[in-house]
Image: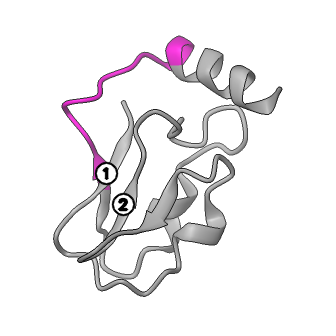
């Protein structure tokens, strides 16, 4: 499942440089995650890096974009090409 950034985001920008997929960008009100690019860091790290650096725990699972670990691995492989 892709992650999303909740309304608790304080727009500090700590998450953006941590994303190996470049899925995080600054939005109008807060940072946002592109679910088409987010792999929850599968294929790169053991855990989502954005969530690990977020000071307010705003990087949370996005239930509207459920994907299996295998799906995330395949997405990561495609993005690495």
When the figure is inspected, residue 30 is found, relative to residue 73, above or below; the finding is below
Task: Determine the residue positioned at 40% across, 53% down.
Answer: 33
Q: Residue furthest front?
A: 28
Query: Residue 34, located in which quarter of the rendered image?
Result: top left
* Disc 1 packing (10 Å; few <14; some 14–19; many ≥20): many
Q: Secondary structure at mark 1?
A: strand
Task: Name above or below for residue 39 compared with residue 48.
Answer: above
Q: Is residue 11 above or below residue 73?
A: below
Q: Write the residue at 39% across / 82% down.
A: 55
Residue 66 placement (x, y as % from top left): 30, 23
Q: Are marks 1 and 2 in contact (CB under 8 Å)?
A: yes
Residue 69 magenta = yes
Specify the farthest residue to the right.
81
N-terminal label among 1 and 2: 1
Q: Where is mark 1, residue-wise?
A: 4
Left or right of 33 in this view: 17:
right
Q: Give the residue displayed 62% in from the left and 53% down from the top.
A: 22
Q: Is residue 59 magenta?
A: no
Residue, disc 2: 32
Quarter of the image for the N terminus: give it: top left
Of marks 1 and 2, the one in the foreground? 2
Q: Which residues are magenta?
A: 60-71
Looking at the image, residue 31 sits to the left or right of residue 65; the answer is right
Q: Give the percent coordinates (x, y) of residue 25.
A: 48, 64
Q: Secondary structure at mark 2?
A: strand
**Distance (Cα) linking label 1 and label 2:** 7 Å
In which quadrant of the rendered image does the C terminus lie?
A: top right
């Amino acid at each position: 499942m892709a992650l999303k950034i909740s309304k608790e985001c304080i727009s500090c920008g700590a998450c953006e440089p941590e994303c190996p997929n470049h899925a995080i960008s600054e939005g109008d009100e807060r940072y946002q995650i592109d679910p088409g690019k987010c792999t929850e860091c599968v294929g790169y790290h053991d855990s989502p890096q954005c969530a690990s650096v977020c000071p307010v725990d705003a990087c949370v699972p996005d239930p509207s974009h459920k994907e299996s670990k295998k799906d995330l691995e395949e997405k990561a492989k495609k993005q690495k090409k």
